[in-house]
Amino acid sequence: MLEARLVQAKDVQSPTGPLPVAWVQVAGWKDVGVPLARLAEVLDYDLKALRSLVQRDPVLRDFERVVTTFSGNLKRSQTYLLRPGVLGALAKISTNRIQDPTKRERVIQFQRWAFETLDRLLFEEPHRAPEPQ
């Protein structure tokens, strides 16, 4: 899994609650990404199942990145899924197999929101995060 550098992060309101979205720099190009753990949380989807879905797919795996942030002496690494990976994972989730109608509708609402919003956010101009000291 490749490293990426955080440029900016902000919480974006989704139909299922606030979702942290980050602009990340990856080897000369910039994309938006979502922490994998928070994606599972807002979908009310098992993190192990979501991680497995990404790991089993060689294309989705290419959009998984580790972002390391520093706060004082604390170093924190977090797995992000870049926008194409998020959209691909959402497309792979079979809502017909979700038995709970409330959970199914939650995933469908989030899918609709993500397909529109993540593309739009990609073209917003992020502010630069301060360089680590």
Image: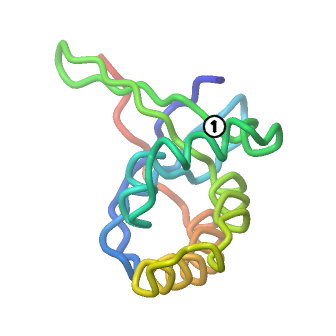
Residue that appears at 71% across and 28% down: 27
Give the total number of marks visible in the rendering.
Answer: 1
Q: Position of residue 92 (x, y in %)?
A: 72, 63
Amino acid type, residue under disc 1 in the picture = Glu
Residue that appears at 63% across and 73% down: 97
Between 84 and 90, the one nearer to me in the picture? 90
Between 108 and 27, the one nearer to me in the picture? 108
Q: Position of residue 107 (x, y in %)?
A: 51, 76
Q: Position of residue 26 (x, y in %)?
A: 66, 34
Residue that appears at 59% across and 33% down: 65
Between 71 and 114, the one nearer to me in the picture? 114
Q: Quadrant of the C terminus?
A: top left
Describe residue 87's horizontal placement relative to residue 75 as left or right. Answer: right
Residue that appears at 74% across and 38% down: 56
Secondary structure type for disc 1: strand
Residue to which mark 1 is pinned = 64
Q: Is residue 104 above or below residue 50?
A: below
Q: Quadrant of the N terminus?
A: top right
Q: Quadrant of residue 30?
A: top right
Describe residue 60's horizontal placement relative to residue 83 as left or right. Answer: right
Q: Quadrant of residue 77?
A: top left
Q: Is residue 38 above or below residue 44?
A: above
Q: Dot 1 surroundings within 10 Å: few (below 14), some, or many (20 or more)?
A: many
Q: Position of residue 40 (x, y in %)?
A: 44, 55
Describe residue 122's horizontal placement relative to residue 84 as left or right. Answer: left
The residue most toward the top is 73
The residue most toward the front is 99
Q: Is residue 21 above or below residue 106?
A: above
Between 65 and 24, the one nearer to me in the picture? 65
Q: Is residue 97 above or below residue 105?
A: above
The residue most toward the left is 72
